[in-house]
Image (tube, rainbow, N blue to C red):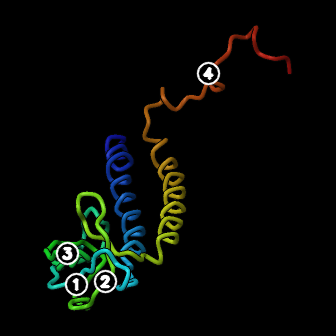
Amino acid sequence: MTALHRVFAFLLVPFLGYLLGATIFNFFWDKAEPGDLKNADMIAVAQSCERKGPVALRGFGYYYDCRIERRFKSGTVNTSIVTGWLDPSDIGKQYAAHTMRRAQSAPDERPHIFVGWLCTFVFAVLFLILWAKIAVPAFPERFRKMPEDLEQPEQSKPPS
């Protein structure tokens, strides 16, 4: 029974915690606004979208990988794939965007970033407290003893 408790405490609970945290964060992160198209360095226009999910590294729920056409100020036009912040209802709409690391396109305006970080942080703190309650009993007895729980010799005990 302790082996099953350890599998649950150290494999399943952290995995589910990660998926729930990713779901909370990506729910807010994937909200995008069109932004200021006149001052944009790049304009992204969705051409087609493919539905992914329901369980992925981004958490629970469905999301879309959309093929976009990227139009730069310099006149260069190319295509790319973005994950999450566009969906089929955005096909043909223009979004002010920029390129992030690894040349991935991202929207210029994400209005709910702070709320996403805050909710994810609160979830992480509560999850770690819950995980400690579940995981501590799964440790072997020798690791659960606190230094004050160890028996002291009779002569070193304080008088009562």
Please tell me in which quadrant of the rendered image residue 125 appears.
Answer: bottom right
Q: Residue 65: which numbered mark, if any? A: 3
> Mark 1 or 3, which is nearer the eye?
1
Residue at 50 percent of width and 62 percent of height: 123
- Which secondary structure, mark 3? strand
Residue at 43 percent of width and 32 percent of height: 140
In the image, residue 139 sits, relative to residue 50, either above or below, namely: above
Q: Neighbour class for label 4 at 10 Å: few (<14), some, many (≥20)? A: few
Are discs 1 and 2 less than 8 Å apart at CB? yes
The residue indicated by pointer 2 is 95
Q: Closer to the N terminus: mark 1 or mark 3? A: 1
The residue indicated by pointer 4 is 150
- Which secondary structure, mark 1? strand
Q: Position of residue 90 (x, y in %)?
A: 26, 89
- Which secondary structure, mark 4? loop
Q: Amino acid at mark 4?
A: Leu
The answer for how far apart the CA atoms under marks 1 and 3 are is 13 Å
